[in-house]
Image (cartoon, rainbow, N blue to C red):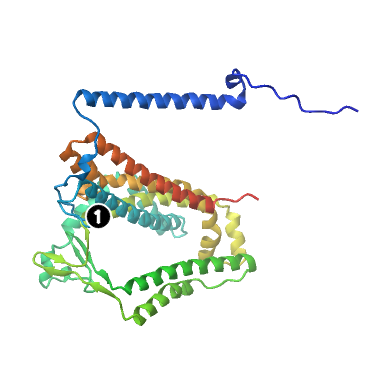
Amino acid sequence: MTTLSDPPRESFRLSMLVNDTRYRSYTFQFIALVCVAALFAYLGSNLVANLRAAGLNISYDFLGDPSGYDINQTLIDYTSQSSHLRASIAGLLNTLLVSILACITATIIGVAAGVLRLSNNWLVSKLMAVYVEMFRNVPVLIWIIIIFTIMTAVAPAPSAFRGDDPDASMLFGMFAFTNRGVYIPKPLFEPLGWVVLGVFLISIVGAILYRRYATKVLYDEGRLLPTTWPTVAIVLVPAILAYFILGRPIALEIPELGGFNFSGGITLLGSLIALWFALAIYTGAFIAENVRAGIQSVSRGQTEAAAALGLRPRRIMNLVVLPQALRVIVPPLISHYLNITKNSSLAIAVGYMDLTGTLGGITLNQTGRAIETILLLMLFYLLISLSISAIMNVYNNAVRLKER
């Protein structure tokens, strides 16, 4: 009887880096990495040499100088005497604000349009098809300008709210829609008001945990627990009780017309709203197609089996189809979120002062530091994009198909 044994391990030789398939790919990757590093080193040394020949150097001392310009809408305290660094931070926050608002709105619009496009109602499905084709095939810059033009041309001026014009009256006595923007109430928090806000946030977490529990009971025991009214009750009741028990520690500052404009409250400039809705509606058309493709990727037998068990169409969509379709929807959704962030740099077209308008626009022109500002601009957008990708990839790993 003979026995088989593994052949003796061959000693490593340099020729194996090219001839052996186990090492060849690493060799080519290393060579490519060295070439890329050499290219960047050459470009960097060439840049430094040219700046030195022109009597210039790379310096970020200008960030501490007064900016000398105003920003029409900021989330932090800012004046024209603030530094260029603070102006850049204000622009960065404005970019994040419009990007987050557009991502949330585009997701809602895209999911709704994608589901309705598969509706059995001919009129609804065709309307959604027209929406997708119309918005997807027209550049987003044109939609930004169209929405901004409509707002400034159709909405009344703030001075019109002085008269008896029924078209220029505040909605519910608290909201004013003008050609300069939208004015909404501003919450004013007393010390105990933050307790109410904390209760509200904890209630949201509790509602999410309850819905997960209801889903687990449905899958494990087959019992269908109500989710709509318990979710609303969990979110609202504790916060409302805390609000009245603590003596109404949250008040509203209502916008009031003074002079030629409104004062008080929160101002949403027309440029912000135009950019927000244009990005949301434009990107929502792409998301709708991803949602439609994801739903159609789920076997029809899944829907028929769920219907045979007595589930209603809405629950079939929420519990059977969409959870499986997410594996197809989420990966391209990440790219759409990144596109929203990058397309927000078109804000300068309607005068919204985002990161590109402040750091890459006025600061660059005033200081003449093109290299420094462009490098900072690239770094900020890179960090935002990597953060979005990291967060969405965590969610993508949570919803992907788990192998046994």
Asked if 375 appears above or below 282 in the picture, the reply is above
Question: Where residue 317 appears, x then y in whole percent?
Answer: 52, 61
Examine the rendering and report whether any part of residue 293 can be seen: no
**Is 24 or 52 nearer to us in this picture?**
52
Asked if 284 appears above or below 195 in the picture, the reply is above
Amino acid carrying label 1: it is: Leu
Quadrant housing residue 356: top left
Tell whether 254 sits left or right of 192.
left
Question: Where residue 242 appears, x then y in whole percent?
Answer: 38, 78
User: Circle 1 is placed at which residue position?
Assistant: 272
**Is 102 or 138 nearer to us in this picture?**
102
Q: Residue at x 32, y 44 (%)?
A: 380
Q: Residue at x 46, y 52 (%)?
A: 291
Instruction: Count residues near mark 1 (Cα–Cα under 10 Å), then give few for <14, some for 14-19, many for 20+.
Output: many
Looking at the image, the residue that sits furthest to the top is 15
Tell whether 306 sits left or right of 258.
right
Question: Where residue 346 appears, x then y in whole percent?
Answer: 26, 45
Tell whether 86 sits left or right of 107.
left
Looking at the image, the residue that sits furthest to the left is 259
Q: Residue at x 37, y 44 (%)?
A: 383
Q: Residue at x 34, y 54 (%)?
A: 100
**Is 291 or 68 nearer to us in this picture?**
68
For the N terminus, the quadrant is: top right
Examine the rendering and report whether any part of residue 64 can be seen: yes
Question: Where residue 116 appears, x then y in whole percent?
Answer: 43, 58
**Is 32 or 85 nearer to us in this picture?**
85
Q: How many marks?
A: 1
Tell whether 79 sits left or right of 389.
left
Secondary structure under the numbered disc 1 in the rendered image? helix
